[in-house]
Image: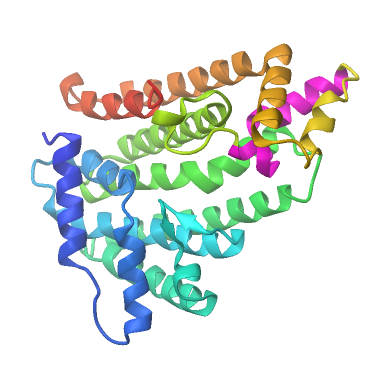
Amino acid sequence: MYHYNELLDKVNQALREHDVRKAPEYLYTPISYEMSLGGKRLRPVLMLMAYNLYHEDVDYALLPAIGLETYHNFTLLHDDVMDHAEVRRGKPCVHRKWNENTAILSGDHMLIMAMQRICQCHPRHLPDMMQLFSQTAIEIDEGQQYDMDFEQRDNVTEEEYIEMIRLKTSVLLACALKMGAVLADASNTDATLLYDFGEKMGLAFQLQDDYLDVYGDPSTFGKQIGGDIMEGKKTFMLINALAAAKSANNEELTYWMNNSEASREEKVNAVRSIYNKLGIPQLAKARIEAYTHEALASLNQLPLPENRKQTLRDVALKLLNRDK
């Protein structure tokens, strides 16, 4: 079986070989730019890993895998436009380097390219692949809309938030794993177990991201600590803290979240201190552990030799300890 880095090399090589540098320049150059910004390439690697559980030669799944990565980057490009973001992975976003019209059109084209690449499989797999992809794309759009809706609401519940991150983040990881199983002609039971593994792993991953935004080490987290607090994002941490503070008639958290005059360090430290008093970090860690346990339970149920499943197990545990 392949190791993660070997599959990552295959994905990056395939992306280089299928680069789209052609006319018209202002349609294709932004696409090449967006795809060149890097990232973990987690989704295509997971698809190849799932396929590799059943077959040694993963090249059959390679084009669909980079198709899913193209789709993922399309969502990032359009998210940046909607969020008015300035930087993506340390470089100017497409809509800042060019303009919004260019970003929208190039993003639309990436969606079509993604579908073309995903369709590069045997006809017997095509209906299941397109059904899974289209349903996943619908759910991700729903998750994005919920996320935007939550920006205007102060009464978001934990249940609503979990559903939002499931749609916006988890389903694409789950889709990648299930696509690998479909292409490998795995049983429906196996494909469902891999989907469940990816979905729960995605929930744990996003909740850990919420946690690390407050408690992570800036040198390993990859971005500045306290971004969610400064933006007032409705995260698992803030939603539960607001609920706990409300029940305790504690208005201190609301004061700090609405305080736009304080320095970043002062505001983040104050909110972190309130989280500590309310037991929010312990609550987040418990929920992360619960979703991780559920993810691994699904993986353990796969009727395959343990040594074949270990690579996926290692990836999940590495992702969920990325601050260490």
> Of 281 and 218, which appears nearest the observer?
218
Which percent across, then down, holds residue 32?
30, 68
37 is higher (above) or lower (below) than 216: below
6 is higher (above) or lower (below) than 128: above
> Of 177 and 239, which appears nearest the observer?
239
Q: From the viewer's perspective, tell me whether residue 207 is left or right of residue 7.
A: right
At a point 84% along the width and 31% down the height, the residue shown is: 255
At a point 55% along the width and 46% down the height, the residue shown is: 167
Would residue 54 be visible to someone looking at this image? no
> Of 78 and 186, which appears nearest the observer?
78
At a point 47% along the width and 39% down the height, the residue shown is: 223
Q: From the viewer's perspective, tell me whether residue 86 is left or right of residue 323.
A: right
Quadrant that contains the N terminus: top left
Which segment did they paint magenta? 227-247
Question: What secondary structure predominates along the stretch shown in magenta?
Answer: helix
Q: From the viewer's perspective, tell me whether residue 270 is left or right of residue 210.
A: right
Which percent across, then down, holds residue 106?
42, 75
Quadrant that contains the C terminus: top left
Q: Residue furthest left?
A: 57
